[in-house]
Amino acid sequence: MPIWILICPECKSEFEHSQISDVGMASLLLPEKPSFEPTGNKCVCPSCGTSATYHRTDLLYRDYPLLRFEWLKRAINKRR
Ligand SMILES: [Zn+2]
């Protein structure tokens, strides 16, 4: 599943903000970004723990085939 990511201003590592639903994937266009507060949303970087304020424009689209595979595996395991 593709995800929205944010980039930490401190350590520059990418982390997941949210997953993009299959509904969004049905469109050939880039799915709509999740809504943010007008003043920005505070998110904590899982790598270095830095809390920073992010805006909707900071969201980047990522589709990691490997992650998709991992999620698929997890989804299959859950069903058992
Ligand atoms: Zn960081």
Image (cartoon, helix red, strand yellow):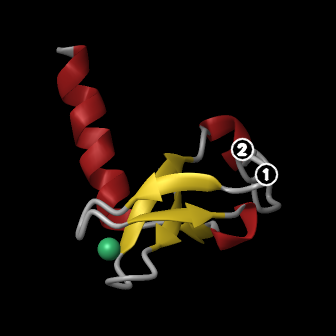
Q: Is residue 43 above or below residue 54?
A: above
Residue depicted at x 25% and y 16% = 79
Q: Quadrant of ligand 1?
A: bottom left
> Disc 2 to disc 1, how far (Cα)?
7 Å
Earlier-in-chain disc, 2 versus 1: 2
Residue type at mark 2 is: Gly
Q: Depth check: give the residue in front, 49 or 34.
A: 49
- Crowd band around label 2 with a 10 angstrom C-alpha radius: few (<14), some (14–19), many (20+): some
Residue under pointer 1: 32
Q: Is residue 28 left or right of residue 61?
A: right
Q: Is mark 2 within 8 Å of ligand 1?
A: no
Q: Is residue 21 found left or right of 72 in the rendered image? A: right
Question: Which amino acid, by three-letter code, is at mark 1?
Answer: Glu
Quarter of the image for residue 13 reads bottom left
Q: Tell me the residue at 57%/63% (across/down).
A: 53
Q: Are marks 2 and 1 in contact (CB under 8 Å)?
A: yes
Residue 48 is left or right of residue 43, and the answer is: left
Q: Which residue is the site of mark 2?
A: 24
The C terminus lies in quadrant: top left
